[in-house]
Amino acid sequence: MQQSKALAILKSGRNVFLTGSAGAGKTYVLNQYINYLKQHGVPVAITASTGIAATHMNGQTIHSWAGIGIKSHVTDRYLTSLRDKKFFRDKMDKVKVLIIDEISMLHRNQLDAVDYVLKFFKQNDEPFGGIQVIFSGDFFQLPPIGEEWEESKDKFCFMSDAWVQSKVHICYLTEQYRQKNNELNDILNEIRSGMISEKTVNLLQSRIEYFPDEIDSQTRLYTHNMDVDRINKGQLINIDSSSKKFEAKVAGNPALIEVLKKSVLAEDNLELKIGAKVMFVRNNFEVGFVNGTLGIVSGYTEKNEPIIKTLDNEFHVAKPETWAIEDESGKALASFTQVPLRLAWAITIHKSQGMTLDSAFIDLSKAFEKGQGYVALSRLRDLNSLMLNGLNQTALEIDSLAMKADRRFQVLSNEIDDFLDEKELQDSWAPFIRFSGGTLDKKQIAKNVEKNKTKEKGPKRSTQEITLEYVRDGLSLDEIAEKRGLTTSAIVDHIGKIKEIEPDLDYSKFKPSDKIINRVRLAYSEIEFEDNKFLKPIYDFCDSEISYEDIKKALLFID
Protein backbone atom coordinates (compact mmCIF):
# COMPACT_ATOMS: atom_id res chain seq x y z
CA MET A 1 0.00 0.00 0.00
CA GLN A 2 1.22 3.49 -0.83
CA GLN A 3 1.57 6.15 1.84
CA SER A 4 -1.13 8.35 0.30
CA LYS A 5 -3.69 5.55 0.48
CA ALA A 6 -2.82 4.76 4.12
CA LEU A 7 -3.17 8.45 5.01
CA ALA A 8 -6.55 8.58 3.28
CA ILE A 9 -7.74 5.61 5.37
CA LEU A 10 -6.50 7.24 8.58
CA LYS A 11 -8.39 10.44 7.75
CA SER A 12 -11.61 8.44 7.30
CA GLY A 13 -11.63 7.67 11.04
CA ARG A 14 -11.14 3.91 10.68
CA ASN A 15 -9.07 1.95 13.20
CA VAL A 16 -5.72 1.14 11.59
CA PHE A 17 -2.63 -0.99 12.06
CA LEU A 18 0.16 0.79 10.16
CA THR A 19 3.05 -1.53 9.40
CA GLY A 20 5.73 -2.34 6.85
CA SER A 21 9.45 -2.98 6.62
CA ALA A 22 12.16 -0.58 7.75
CA GLY A 23 12.28 2.52 5.57
CA ALA A 24 8.67 2.25 4.37
CA GLY A 25 7.70 5.53 6.03
CA LYS A 26 5.48 4.56 8.98
CA THR A 27 6.64 7.51 11.08
CA TYR A 28 6.23 9.89 8.15
CA VAL A 29 2.60 8.86 7.63
CA LEU A 30 1.86 9.13 11.35
CA ASN A 31 3.33 12.63 11.52
CA GLN A 32 1.31 13.68 8.48
CA TYR A 33 -1.86 12.50 10.16
CA ILE A 34 -0.98 14.08 13.51
CA ASN A 35 -0.43 17.44 11.80
CA TYR A 36 -3.76 17.04 9.98
CA LEU A 37 -5.61 16.37 13.26
CA LYS A 38 -3.96 19.34 15.00
CA GLN A 39 -4.81 21.63 12.10
CA HIS A 40 -8.46 20.61 12.39
CA GLY A 41 -8.51 20.86 16.19
CA VAL A 42 -9.08 17.15 16.88
CA PRO A 43 -7.73 16.04 20.29
CA VAL A 44 -5.14 13.31 19.70
CA ALA A 45 -3.12 11.29 22.22
CA ILE A 46 0.34 10.41 20.90
CA THR A 47 1.85 7.46 22.75
CA ALA A 48 4.31 4.60 22.35
CA SER A 49 5.14 1.39 24.18
CA THR A 50 8.57 2.65 25.34
CA GLY A 51 9.99 5.95 26.51
CA ILE A 52 12.55 6.07 23.72
CA ALA A 53 9.88 5.47 21.07
CA ALA A 54 7.63 8.07 22.70
CA THR A 55 10.28 10.78 22.32
CA HIS A 56 10.47 10.05 18.60
CA MET A 57 6.78 11.02 18.36
CA ASN A 58 6.89 13.86 20.92
CA GLY A 59 4.48 11.82 23.02
CA GLN A 60 4.43 9.77 26.19
CA THR A 61 4.30 6.08 27.05
CA ILE A 62 0.92 4.41 26.68
CA HIS A 63 1.37 3.01 30.20
CA SER A 64 1.61 6.51 31.64
CA TRP A 65 -1.10 8.04 29.45
CA ALA A 66 -3.65 5.34 30.26
CA GLY A 67 -2.70 5.20 33.94
CA ILE A 68 -1.94 1.47 33.87
CA GLY A 69 1.75 1.64 34.82
CA ILE A 70 3.14 -1.88 35.05
CA LYS A 71 -0.32 -3.35 35.56
CA SER A 72 -1.57 -6.11 33.25
CA HIS A 73 -5.16 -5.72 34.45
CA VAL A 74 -7.19 -2.88 35.95
CA THR A 75 -10.25 -2.95 38.21
CA ASP A 76 -13.28 -0.68 38.45
CA ARG A 77 -12.16 0.32 41.92
CA TYR A 78 -8.78 1.45 40.62
CA LEU A 79 -10.36 3.34 37.72
CA THR A 80 -12.77 5.03 40.12
CA SER A 81 -9.75 6.38 42.00
CA LEU A 82 -8.36 7.71 38.70
CA ARG A 83 -11.70 9.34 37.90
CA ASP A 84 -11.35 11.41 41.05
CA LYS A 85 -8.34 13.13 39.42
CA LYS A 86 -9.78 15.94 37.32
CA PHE A 87 -6.84 16.23 34.93
CA PHE A 88 -7.02 12.53 34.14
CA ARG A 89 -10.79 12.52 33.77
CA ASP A 90 -10.73 15.55 31.47
CA LYS A 91 -7.94 14.02 29.38
CA MET A 92 -9.99 10.89 28.80
CA ASP A 93 -13.15 12.89 28.05
CA LYS A 94 -11.42 15.00 25.40
CA VAL A 95 -9.41 12.41 23.46
CA LYS A 96 -10.86 11.40 20.09
CA VAL A 97 -7.86 9.66 18.51
CA LEU A 98 -5.30 7.41 20.20
CA ILE A 99 -1.98 6.57 18.51
CA ILE A 100 0.23 3.80 19.91
CA ASP A 101 3.64 3.49 18.23
CA GLU A 102 5.93 0.45 18.58
CA ILE A 103 2.80 -1.58 19.31
CA SER A 104 4.70 -4.87 19.07
CA MET A 105 6.28 -4.28 22.48
CA LEU A 106 2.92 -3.91 24.23
CA HIS A 107 1.70 -7.10 25.92
CA ARG A 108 -1.77 -8.31 24.85
CA ASN A 109 -3.01 -7.98 28.45
CA GLN A 110 -1.88 -4.35 28.57
CA LEU A 111 -3.69 -3.51 25.32
CA ASP A 112 -6.83 -5.05 26.82
CA ALA A 113 -6.25 -2.90 29.91
CA VAL A 114 -6.03 0.27 27.78
CA ASP A 115 -9.25 -0.75 26.06
CA TYR A 116 -10.96 -1.21 29.43
CA VAL A 117 -9.75 2.18 30.71
CA LEU A 118 -11.23 3.99 27.69
CA LYS A 119 -14.51 2.07 27.87
CA PHE A 120 -14.77 3.01 31.56
CA PHE A 121 -14.13 6.72 31.10
CA LYS A 122 -16.09 7.07 27.86
CA GLN A 123 -18.98 5.04 29.31
CA ASN A 124 -19.07 3.33 25.95
CA ASP A 125 -18.79 -0.42 25.37
CA GLU A 126 -17.48 0.03 21.84
CA PRO A 127 -13.80 -0.97 21.42
CA PHE A 128 -11.59 1.66 23.06
CA GLY A 129 -14.66 3.58 24.10
CA GLY A 130 -15.61 4.40 20.50
CA ILE A 131 -12.57 6.53 19.63
CA GLN A 132 -10.25 5.97 16.66
CA VAL A 133 -7.18 3.88 17.51
CA ILE A 134 -4.05 3.66 15.39
CA PHE A 135 -1.40 1.05 16.03
CA SER A 136 1.98 1.33 14.36
CA GLY A 137 4.91 -1.01 14.44
CA ASP A 138 6.48 -4.24 13.30
CA PHE A 139 5.85 -7.62 14.93
CA PHE A 140 9.23 -8.92 13.84
CA GLN A 141 10.50 -7.26 17.00
CA LEU A 142 10.98 -9.55 20.01
CA PRO A 143 7.75 -10.37 21.85
CA PRO A 144 6.90 -8.29 24.93
CA ILE A 145 8.37 -9.44 28.23
CA GLY A 146 5.91 -11.73 29.98
CA GLU A 147 5.82 -14.72 32.26
CA GLU A 148 8.35 -17.49 31.67
CA TRP A 149 5.62 -19.93 30.68
CA GLU A 150 4.07 -17.58 28.10
CA GLU A 151 4.49 -18.29 24.40
CA SER A 152 4.38 -15.67 21.65
CA LYS A 153 0.63 -16.17 21.19
CA ASP A 154 0.16 -15.29 24.86
CA LYS A 155 2.06 -12.02 24.48
CA PHE A 156 1.63 -10.48 21.02
CA CYS A 157 -1.13 -7.88 21.24
CA PHE A 158 -2.70 -8.84 17.89
CA MET A 159 -3.95 -11.90 19.81
CA SER A 160 -5.82 -9.70 22.32
CA ASP A 161 -9.60 -9.32 22.51
CA ALA A 162 -9.25 -5.55 22.10
CA TRP A 163 -7.34 -5.93 18.82
CA VAL A 164 -9.87 -8.38 17.36
CA GLN A 165 -12.91 -6.38 18.45
CA SER A 166 -11.55 -3.08 17.13
CA LYS A 167 -11.54 -4.51 13.57
CA VAL A 168 -8.36 -2.70 12.57
CA HIS A 169 -7.72 -2.00 8.90
CA ILE A 170 -4.25 -3.20 7.92
CA CYS A 171 -2.15 -0.66 6.05
CA TYR A 172 1.03 -2.44 5.01
CA LEU A 173 3.38 0.13 3.47
CA THR A 174 5.48 -1.29 0.65
CA GLU A 175 7.40 1.69 -0.76
CA GLN A 176 11.00 2.30 0.26
CA TYR A 177 12.09 5.87 1.02
CA ARG A 178 15.47 5.55 2.70
CA GLN A 179 18.17 7.13 0.59
CA LYS A 180 21.15 5.61 2.38
CA ASN A 181 22.85 2.35 1.58
CA ASN A 182 19.98 -0.12 1.06
CA GLU A 183 22.03 -3.26 1.66
CA LEU A 184 20.88 -3.39 5.26
CA ASN A 185 17.22 -3.00 4.24
CA ASP A 186 17.65 -5.88 1.79
CA ILE A 187 19.10 -8.06 4.55
CA LEU A 188 16.24 -7.19 6.92
CA ASN A 189 13.64 -7.95 4.27
CA GLU A 190 15.21 -11.34 3.61
CA ILE A 191 15.12 -12.15 7.33
CA ARG A 192 11.44 -11.10 7.36
CA SER A 193 10.69 -13.43 4.48
CA GLY A 194 12.53 -16.36 6.04
CA MET A 195 14.58 -16.81 2.86
CA ILE A 196 18.21 -15.92 3.47
CA SER A 197 20.37 -15.67 0.36
CA GLU A 198 24.05 -16.54 0.13
CA LYS A 199 24.71 -12.88 -0.66
CA THR A 200 23.20 -11.82 2.70
CA VAL A 201 25.24 -14.38 4.62
CA ASN A 202 28.41 -13.20 2.90
CA LEU A 203 27.63 -9.53 3.57
CA LEU A 204 27.09 -10.17 7.27
CA GLN A 205 30.19 -12.32 7.55
CA SER A 206 32.19 -9.52 5.95
CA ARG A 207 31.29 -7.38 9.00
CA ILE A 208 32.69 -9.96 11.45
CA GLU A 209 35.84 -8.29 12.65
CA TYR A 210 37.08 -7.27 16.05
CA PHE A 211 38.46 -3.78 16.50
CA PRO A 212 39.39 -3.45 20.17
CA ASP A 213 40.68 0.10 19.73
CA GLU A 214 37.59 1.31 17.91
CA ILE A 215 34.67 0.08 19.98
CA ASP A 216 35.06 2.10 23.14
CA SER A 217 32.65 4.68 21.76
CA GLN A 218 30.29 2.12 20.24
CA THR A 219 27.16 0.81 21.88
CA ARG A 220 27.62 -2.93 22.28
CA LEU A 221 24.66 -5.25 21.97
CA TYR A 222 24.68 -8.77 23.38
CA THR A 223 22.10 -11.52 23.63
CA HIS A 224 22.88 -12.48 27.24
CA ASN A 225 22.89 -10.47 30.47
CA MET A 226 26.02 -12.34 31.54
CA ASP A 227 28.06 -10.85 28.68
CA VAL A 228 26.58 -7.40 29.28
CA ASP A 229 27.55 -7.50 32.95
CA ARG A 230 31.05 -8.78 32.15
CA ILE A 231 31.75 -5.98 29.67
CA ASN A 232 30.29 -3.26 31.88
CA LYS A 233 32.21 -4.34 34.97
CA GLY A 234 35.43 -4.65 32.99
CA GLN A 235 35.06 -1.17 31.54
CA LEU A 236 34.31 0.29 34.96
CA ILE A 237 37.45 -1.27 36.44
CA ASN A 238 39.51 0.30 33.63
CA ILE A 239 38.57 3.80 34.81
CA ASP A 240 41.34 4.90 37.17
CA SER A 241 39.33 6.82 39.74
CA SER A 242 37.33 6.25 42.90
CA SER A 243 33.83 4.90 42.69
CA LYS A 244 30.55 5.68 44.39
CA LYS A 245 28.08 2.98 45.34
CA PHE A 246 24.32 3.34 45.45
CA GLU A 247 22.29 0.71 47.27
CA ALA A 248 18.61 0.32 46.52
CA LYS A 249 16.16 0.80 49.39
CA VAL A 250 13.21 -1.56 49.54
CA ALA A 251 10.13 -1.65 51.75
CA GLY A 252 6.91 -3.59 52.01
CA ASN A 253 5.80 -7.15 51.35
CA PRO A 254 8.86 -9.32 50.50
CA ALA A 255 7.03 -11.33 47.83
CA LEU A 256 5.78 -8.15 46.12
CA ILE A 257 9.27 -6.64 46.34
CA GLU A 258 10.58 -9.58 44.30
CA VAL A 259 7.79 -9.06 41.75
CA LEU A 260 8.70 -5.37 41.59
CA LYS A 261 12.40 -6.10 41.06
CA LYS A 262 11.58 -8.18 37.98
CA SER A 263 9.89 -5.20 36.33
CA VAL A 264 12.50 -2.64 37.40
CA LEU A 265 15.68 -2.26 35.35
CA ALA A 266 17.56 -0.40 38.07
CA GLU A 267 20.14 -2.48 39.94
CA ASP A 268 20.08 -3.45 43.61
CA ASN A 269 23.67 -2.27 43.92
CA LEU A 270 24.97 0.31 41.46
CA GLU A 271 28.63 1.29 41.27
CA LEU A 272 29.61 4.40 39.27
CA LYS A 273 32.73 6.36 38.37
CA ILE A 274 33.16 9.68 36.61
CA GLY A 275 33.44 8.83 32.92
CA ALA A 276 31.22 5.73 33.17
CA LYS A 277 28.82 5.17 30.30
CA VAL A 278 25.28 4.85 31.66
CA MET A 279 21.68 4.53 30.59
CA PHE A 280 18.59 5.91 32.31
CA VAL A 281 16.09 3.20 33.20
CA ARG A 282 13.13 5.40 34.08
CA ASN A 283 10.98 7.85 32.14
CA ASN A 284 10.99 11.41 33.41
CA PHE A 285 9.63 13.55 30.62
CA GLU A 286 9.42 16.61 32.85
CA VAL A 287 13.17 16.54 33.53
CA GLY A 288 14.08 15.48 30.01
CA PHE A 289 15.22 11.85 30.04
CA VAL A 290 13.51 8.57 29.27
CA ASN A 291 14.11 4.89 29.71
CA GLY A 292 17.01 4.24 27.30
CA THR A 293 18.62 7.70 27.28
CA LEU A 294 22.40 7.22 27.12
CA GLY A 295 25.06 9.42 28.69
CA ILE A 296 28.29 9.75 30.67
CA VAL A 297 28.73 10.37 34.41
CA SER A 298 30.31 13.85 34.51
CA GLY A 299 30.26 14.47 38.28
CA TYR A 300 28.11 14.55 41.40
CA THR A 301 26.01 17.13 43.22
CA GLU A 302 26.64 18.11 46.83
CA LYS A 303 24.07 15.46 47.71
CA ASN A 304 26.13 12.81 45.83
CA GLU A 305 23.55 12.58 43.06
CA PRO A 306 25.13 11.60 39.71
CA ILE A 307 25.24 14.31 37.03
CA ILE A 308 24.79 12.79 33.58
CA LYS A 309 25.86 14.38 30.30
CA THR A 310 23.66 12.84 27.60
CA LEU A 311 24.73 12.15 24.02
CA ASP A 312 23.00 15.35 22.89
CA ASN A 313 25.13 17.36 25.38
CA GLU A 314 22.40 18.00 27.94
CA PHE A 315 22.99 17.61 31.67
CA HIS A 316 20.58 15.85 34.04
CA VAL A 317 20.82 15.00 37.72
CA ALA A 318 19.90 11.38 38.39
CA LYS A 319 17.92 11.71 41.60
CA PRO A 320 16.68 8.56 43.35
CA GLU A 321 13.31 7.40 42.04
CA THR A 322 10.77 5.11 43.61
CA TRP A 323 8.96 2.27 41.89
CA ALA A 324 5.96 0.97 43.81
CA ILE A 325 3.13 -1.54 43.77
CA GLU A 326 0.04 0.12 45.22
CA ASP A 327 -3.35 -1.09 46.34
CA GLU A 328 -6.58 0.36 44.99
CA SER A 329 -6.43 3.28 47.43
CA GLY A 330 -2.94 4.25 46.31
CA LYS A 331 -1.17 2.88 49.40
CA ALA A 332 2.26 1.42 48.63
CA LEU A 333 2.40 -2.32 49.27
CA ALA A 334 6.00 -2.59 48.10
CA SER A 335 8.55 -0.02 46.99
CA PHE A 336 12.01 0.03 45.40
CA THR A 337 14.04 3.26 45.51
CA GLN A 338 17.24 3.65 43.52
CA VAL A 339 19.16 5.99 41.23
CA PRO A 340 17.54 5.31 37.80
CA LEU A 341 20.76 4.33 36.03
CA ARG A 342 22.69 1.30 34.93
CA LEU A 343 26.04 0.85 33.23
CA ALA A 344 25.68 0.93 29.45
CA TRP A 345 28.89 0.22 27.60
CA ALA A 346 26.92 -2.88 26.74
CA ILE A 347 23.17 -3.55 26.76
CA THR A 348 21.01 -6.50 25.83
CA ILE A 349 19.39 -6.66 22.42
CA HIS A 350 16.02 -6.90 24.15
CA LYS A 351 16.67 -3.58 25.86
CA SER A 352 17.74 -1.96 22.58
CA GLN A 353 14.24 -2.20 21.07
CA GLY A 354 12.93 1.22 20.17
CA MET A 355 16.43 2.71 19.86
CA THR A 356 18.12 4.03 16.74
CA LEU A 357 21.92 3.76 16.82
CA ASP A 358 24.40 5.54 14.57
CA SER A 359 26.76 2.60 14.98
CA ALA A 360 27.01 -0.51 17.11
CA PHE A 361 29.18 -3.49 17.96
CA ILE A 362 26.86 -6.53 17.96
CA ASP A 363 27.53 -10.09 19.11
CA LEU A 364 25.05 -12.54 17.60
CA SER A 365 27.19 -15.62 18.12
CA LYS A 366 25.04 -16.78 21.05
CA ALA A 367 21.60 -15.80 19.76
CA PHE A 368 19.06 -18.04 21.48
CA GLU A 369 15.74 -16.41 20.60
CA LYS A 370 14.32 -16.00 17.12
CA GLY A 371 14.13 -12.34 16.20
CA GLN A 372 17.24 -11.22 18.10
CA GLY A 373 19.24 -10.77 14.91
CA TYR A 374 16.48 -8.81 13.21
CA VAL A 375 16.00 -6.50 16.22
CA ALA A 376 19.73 -5.85 16.62
CA LEU A 377 20.39 -5.15 12.94
CA SER A 378 17.31 -2.95 12.57
CA ARG A 379 18.67 -0.55 15.21
CA LEU A 380 21.16 0.68 12.59
CA ARG A 381 20.74 3.01 9.62
CA ASP A 382 23.08 1.20 7.22
CA LEU A 383 25.44 -1.75 6.98
CA ASN A 384 28.60 0.36 7.18
CA SER A 385 27.80 1.30 10.79
CA LEU A 386 27.83 -2.38 11.87
CA MET A 387 30.68 -4.19 13.61
CA LEU A 388 29.77 -7.82 14.10
CA ASN A 389 31.39 -10.24 16.53
CA GLY A 390 29.88 -13.38 15.08
CA LEU A 391 26.42 -14.81 14.36
CA ASN A 392 24.68 -18.17 14.41
CA GLN A 393 21.70 -19.63 12.57
CA THR A 394 19.17 -18.57 15.20
CA ALA A 395 20.16 -14.93 14.71
CA LEU A 396 18.78 -15.07 11.15
CA GLU A 397 15.49 -16.68 12.13
CA ILE A 398 12.27 -15.02 13.24
CA ASP A 399 9.26 -16.04 15.31
CA SER A 400 6.99 -18.35 13.30
CA LEU A 401 3.84 -16.66 14.62
CA ALA A 402 5.18 -13.24 13.65
CA MET A 403 5.95 -14.53 10.14
CA LYS A 404 2.47 -16.05 9.74
CA ALA A 405 0.87 -12.87 11.05
CA ASP A 406 2.94 -10.68 8.72
CA ARG A 407 1.90 -12.71 5.68
CA ARG A 408 -1.73 -12.43 6.77
CA PHE A 409 -1.31 -8.68 7.29
CA GLN A 410 -0.02 -8.33 3.73
CA VAL A 411 -3.04 -10.21 2.35
CA LEU A 412 -5.50 -8.14 4.38
CA SER A 413 -3.76 -4.92 3.38
CA ASN A 414 -4.00 -5.83 -0.32
CA GLU A 415 -7.70 -6.63 0.08
CA ILE A 416 -8.34 -3.27 1.77
CA ASP A 417 -6.24 -1.48 -0.86
CA ASP A 418 -8.36 -3.02 -3.64
CA PHE A 419 -11.70 -2.51 -1.86
CA LEU A 420 -11.36 1.10 -0.68
CA ASP A 421 -11.24 3.82 -3.31
CA GLU A 422 -9.10 6.80 -2.32
CA LYS A 423 -11.52 9.36 -3.79
CA GLU A 424 -14.49 7.75 -2.03
CA LEU A 425 -12.53 7.76 1.23
CA GLN A 426 -12.31 11.54 0.99
CA ASP A 427 -16.11 11.76 1.40
CA SER A 428 -15.74 10.50 4.98
CA TRP A 429 -13.01 12.94 6.04
CA ALA A 430 -15.26 15.88 6.87
CA PRO A 431 -17.88 13.80 8.78
CA PHE A 432 -15.12 12.31 10.94
CA ILE A 433 -13.72 15.76 11.76
CA ARG A 434 -17.22 16.92 12.77
CA PHE A 435 -17.80 13.74 14.80
CA SER A 436 -14.51 14.34 16.63
CA GLY A 437 -15.39 17.91 17.56
CA GLY A 438 -12.88 19.41 15.15
CA THR A 439 -13.26 22.34 12.78
CA LEU A 440 -13.72 22.61 9.02
CA ASP A 441 -13.55 26.38 9.05
CA LYS A 442 -10.71 27.41 6.76
CA LYS A 443 -9.84 30.53 8.78
CA GLN A 444 -9.61 28.53 12.00
CA ILE A 445 -7.55 25.82 10.28
CA ALA A 446 -5.13 28.50 9.05
CA LYS A 447 -4.88 29.87 12.59
CA ASN A 448 -4.17 26.37 13.92
CA VAL A 449 -1.45 25.89 11.31
CA GLU A 450 0.24 29.13 12.36
CA LYS A 451 -0.19 28.25 16.03
CA ASN A 452 1.52 24.88 15.51
CA LYS A 453 4.33 26.54 13.55
CA THR A 454 4.89 28.99 16.39
CA LYS A 455 5.09 26.14 18.87
CA GLU A 456 7.66 24.37 16.73
CA LYS A 457 9.80 27.43 15.97
CA GLY A 458 9.49 29.39 19.19
CA PRO A 459 12.13 29.26 21.93
CA LYS A 460 11.78 26.10 23.93
CA ARG A 461 10.84 26.76 27.53
CA SER A 462 11.63 24.37 30.34
CA THR A 463 8.72 22.53 31.91
CA GLN A 464 9.28 24.48 35.15
CA GLU A 465 9.06 27.81 33.24
CA ILE A 466 5.70 26.83 31.82
CA THR A 467 4.40 25.88 35.28
CA LEU A 468 5.81 29.12 36.73
CA GLU A 469 3.66 31.11 34.31
CA TYR A 470 0.52 29.38 35.64
CA VAL A 471 1.61 29.89 39.27
CA ARG A 472 1.98 33.62 38.57
CA ASP A 473 -1.51 33.59 37.05
CA GLY A 474 -2.87 32.29 40.35
CA LEU A 475 -4.11 28.91 39.07
CA SER A 476 -4.77 26.08 41.52
CA LEU A 477 -2.82 22.84 41.56
CA ASP A 478 -5.59 20.96 39.74
CA GLU A 479 -5.96 23.72 37.16
CA ILE A 480 -2.22 23.73 36.40
CA ALA A 481 -2.14 19.93 36.14
CA GLU A 482 -5.12 20.02 33.78
CA LYS A 483 -3.54 22.63 31.50
CA ARG A 484 -0.15 20.85 31.52
CA GLY A 485 -1.58 17.35 31.11
CA LEU A 486 0.59 16.22 34.01
CA THR A 487 -0.11 14.74 37.42
CA THR A 488 -0.59 17.06 40.37
CA SER A 489 2.40 15.32 41.96
CA ALA A 490 4.62 16.36 39.03
CA ILE A 491 3.38 19.94 39.36
CA VAL A 492 4.27 19.95 43.08
CA ASP A 493 7.81 18.89 42.08
CA HIS A 494 7.93 21.85 39.68
CA ILE A 495 6.72 24.23 42.39
CA GLY A 496 9.44 23.01 44.74
CA LYS A 497 12.11 24.00 42.19
CA ILE A 498 10.32 27.26 41.36
CA LYS A 499 10.14 28.23 45.04
CA GLU A 500 13.92 28.03 45.31
CA ILE A 501 14.25 30.60 42.48
CA GLU A 502 11.15 32.70 43.17
CA PRO A 503 10.69 32.53 46.97
CA ASP A 504 8.49 35.66 47.15
CA LEU A 505 5.59 34.37 45.06
CA ASP A 506 2.29 33.50 46.73
CA TYR A 507 2.27 29.72 47.23
CA SER A 508 -0.50 29.66 49.84
CA LYS A 509 -3.01 27.88 47.62
CA PHE A 510 -0.69 24.86 47.49
CA LYS A 511 -0.39 24.67 51.27
CA PRO A 512 -1.85 21.56 52.97
CA SER A 513 -3.50 21.68 56.40
CA ASP A 514 -1.53 22.76 59.48
CA LYS A 515 -2.08 19.26 60.87
CA ILE A 516 -0.28 17.69 57.90
CA ILE A 517 2.52 20.25 57.95
CA ASN A 518 3.13 19.77 61.68
CA ARG A 519 3.20 16.01 61.35
CA VAL A 520 5.61 16.10 58.41
CA ARG A 521 7.77 18.68 60.24
CA LEU A 522 8.00 16.33 63.22
CA ALA A 523 8.99 13.44 60.95
CA TYR A 524 11.51 15.59 59.14
CA SER A 525 13.13 16.63 62.42
CA GLU A 526 13.23 13.09 63.84
CA ILE A 527 14.55 11.17 60.83
CA GLU A 528 18.22 10.95 59.97
CA PHE A 529 18.13 10.90 56.20
CA GLU A 530 20.83 9.18 54.24
CA ASP A 531 19.87 11.39 51.30
CA ASN A 532 17.99 14.66 51.17
CA LYS A 533 14.25 14.63 51.93
CA PHE A 534 13.46 11.06 51.01
CA LEU A 535 9.71 10.70 50.93
CA LYS A 536 9.51 7.05 51.94
CA PRO A 537 10.94 7.46 55.48
CA ILE A 538 8.50 10.30 56.16
CA TYR A 539 5.64 8.27 54.68
CA ASP A 540 6.51 5.36 56.99
CA PHE A 541 6.99 7.66 60.02
CA CYS A 542 3.45 8.98 59.47
CA ASP A 543 2.09 5.41 59.43
CA SER A 544 1.20 5.69 55.72
CA GLU A 545 -1.62 8.10 56.65
CA ILE A 546 -0.29 11.03 54.61
CA SER A 547 0.03 10.67 50.85
CA TYR A 548 3.34 11.21 49.06
CA GLU A 549 1.87 14.25 47.33
CA ASP A 550 0.80 15.87 50.62
CA ILE A 551 4.25 15.17 52.04
CA LYS A 552 5.84 16.97 49.08
CA LYS A 553 3.45 19.91 49.50
CA ALA A 554 4.21 20.10 53.22
CA LEU A 555 7.96 20.15 52.57
CA LEU A 556 7.45 23.31 50.49
CA PHE A 557 6.54 25.11 53.72
CA ILE A 558 9.13 23.57 56.05
CA ASP A 559 12.48 25.31 56.38
Image: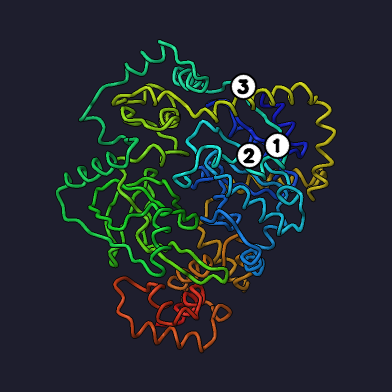
Q: Nearer the viewer, residue 331 or 199?
A: 331
Mark 3 neighbour density, 10 Å: few (under 14) some (14–19) many (20 or more):
some
Residue at the disc numbered 2: 135
The picture places residue 169, in percent across and down from the top left corner, at: 71, 33
Secondary structure, mark 2, is strand
The foreground one among 266 and 411 is: 411
Please state the horizontal and vertical placement of residue 278, each as a whole percent of the image.
32, 48
Judge from the rendering whether residue 174 lies leftward or rightward of residue 352; answer left or right. right
The nearer-to-camera label among 1 and 2 is 1
Q: Identify the image quadrant of the N terminus.
A: top right
Amino acid type at mark 3: Thr
- Mark 1 burial class by Cα count in 10 Å: few <14, some 14-19, many 20+: some
The amino acid pointed to by label 1 is Val
Q: Amino acid at mark 2?
A: Phe
Disc 1 versus disc 3: nearer the observer: 1
Image: 364 above or below 499:
above
Image quarter in which the C terminus is found: bottom left
Instruction: Check if mark 1's residue and mark 2's residue have beta carbons within 8 Å.
Output: yes
What residue is disc 1 on? 168
Q: Viewer-proximal residue, 253 or 357?
A: 253
Mark drawn on residue 174 = 3
Query: Which secondary structure, mark 1?
Result: loop
